[in-house]
Structure formats: structure tokens, C-alpha cells
Amino acid sequence: MGTGWTPAFDQQFKSKDPQHNKTWFFPSNTVMLYLNLYKAPFNNLLVREAISAAINRDNLPQGVALYAKPANPTGIIPARKDWIAPEYQNATFQYSVSQAQAYLKQAGYTQHSDGYFYDSSGKVLGFSIIVPSSWSDWAQDVQFIVNDLNKAGIKATMNGVADANTYFSAIYGGNYEAAISWTDKGPTPYYPYRDMLSSSNSGPIGKSVSGSNFERWDTHTAGALATQVDQLLKQYMTSTDPNVQKQAIQGIEKIMVEQLPAIPLTVNVDWDEYTTKHWTGWPDDSNPYDVGPPYQLPDAANVILHLKPAS
């Protein structure tokens, strides 16, 4: 049993014993582009809209051999689609360089002869996106995003760091401009929304955030909208009525779509490789009782309890 992904995993693992060596990649969370809302110009919705419109999400699955698909604008994974409001069920992000540039002009930026946009003080609109260099799938995604942003006139670069500890220290402490990362998981969208958007999980730069509120969505960066999200999260938690809970989640969906506190990119999968040579009963498409990977706790114990010796 293993976890992880490389472009050559078919050759390195499956081809060595095609009868027994298997993989199962369950879509479990959403990959986001987190923009540090404590730093200008990311506190400007028009800039966030421009960045989102400039990204061609159809290119991103190439980084993981097409296993990841473009995300729904609500950030909710396909397995939780019943929670998505009717107006967003079939919603997609529209890639448009012209629309991205229109947003920037509306925000007061001017495109210069070098192709990049500048603010009224003459400062170029540019930033770096942090990612561990060894995470080959996300590193390739970031390079696609950087290329797209530069085509639209945003001077973006990839900040590839050598180790994951540097990356985690930056995104939890707020010492970054933009970052690619995951959302947390859960049986309903409440859990990733809570971890990503609850103001109690945020804090000023230098204070470590909780959950996955890496963008630092709170009353300082979002004002009354952050308070509204907190109230909707409370509505969900204080009710046992599924309709009331769904109403709360769909209220948050509207804010996600319209305000882009974080920018959904692709559906993230859990990488699970296993062999049926000695044990059977692993989760797969025909029996998706759990997600599979050994890093997923306490689920890994549940998987072990389902295993039986191969005959």
C-alpha cells in the first residue's frame, strides 16, 4: 500500500505486476489558488476576478495525467454535488484574457508597452506563487498558471521552494503572496468551508492560521461578508434540519462564487496505490467505502479492517 504520484507511476508500479498492482484516485477536495488578502492588491475583488479569468483550467489536469478535473466555482467536489445550488450545478469558470484585462482596467490599472499592467503609482501588477519544487504535479500547475497570467499582463512568477517545511511555514504564517494548496475534507461541504472561511481560523500576518484559511478571510479583509459566512456556518452547526443546513451551505456558495475568497482550480484526488497479491478488499470504484491512502487517518484503520488474505 502506498501513496503519492509521479508522471511515471504506470511504469514504476503498475507495469511490474498488472494483475495485482492497482491504483484508485478518489476526488476528495479542491485545489485552490490562495491569495493573501492581507496584502494589496489581493484585497481588491476586481483583481481576484482578473486572476481567475486569466487561468485556463483546462490545461491544469495535464500536470497529473488528466486525473484532476477543473473545479466547480463553488469549490465543492463532485461527490457532494447534491449540496450545490441549482444555479451553480453546471457552472464552470470561463477562461478569457480579454475579460481579465477588462477587470484590471476597471480596477484602475493601465497596460503599458511591455504588455504588463501598472497601477496609478507606476508599480507593475506582479506576484509570486509559492509551491514545493518537488511536488511535480502542483509545480507544473503553477507554471501553467504563471504563463497564463503573464499572457494577460500580470507579471507572475513561480516561487519553487526546496522543502515542504518552508512552504507550510509561509502559508500558515502569511509570509507569501499567492500559493497553491488544498482544502480540507469532510462528509459535507460544511467542513472545508469552515476550515477555509471561518474568521476564527484567521489572524494577522505572523500569526499561524488554523484549518486552511490560508487566504486569511476575516472581518479585517472581508468585513461584513466574513461575519455573514460565520453566521451561515453557525446556522449549519446549530440545526439538525437538512434543509436549514443546505440553505446555509448554499449561502456560502454564493459568497464563494461572487467574492472569490480563494480561487478554485481543480478537483484534488487522493493518491492510493496497492497490490492484491497478498491482501484483497481495498476500496475502489466498485466498493468506495473509504478513500484509501495510508496518510488519511483514521480511515487507514478502516481500510485495514476490510482486508482479507488473498486466496
Image (spheres, helix red, strand yellow):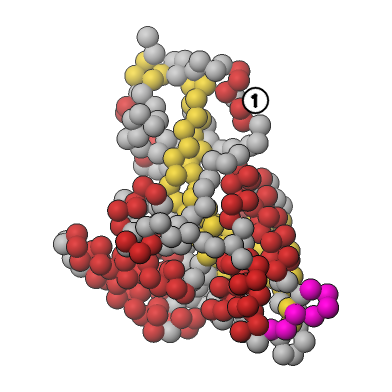
180 sits left or right of 122 in the view: left
Inspect this view and state whether residue 13 appears: yes
User: Is residue 253 inside the magenta stretch?
Assistant: no
What residue is pinned by disc 1?
11
What kind of element bears circle 1? helix
User: Which residue range is magenta in the image?
Assistant: 109-115
Q: Position of residue 210 (x, y in %)?
A: 45, 65
**301 or 96, nearer to the observer:** 96
Q: Is residue 235 above or below residue 111?
A: above
22 versus 59 height, above or below? above
> Residue furthest toward the right?
113
Q: Residues within 10 Å of mark 1 (few under 14, many from 20)?
A: few
Left or right: 47 as drawn, with respect to 232: right
Predominant SS along the magenta part:
loop
Of 118 and 288, nearer the camera is 118
Say whether residue 110 is magenta. yes
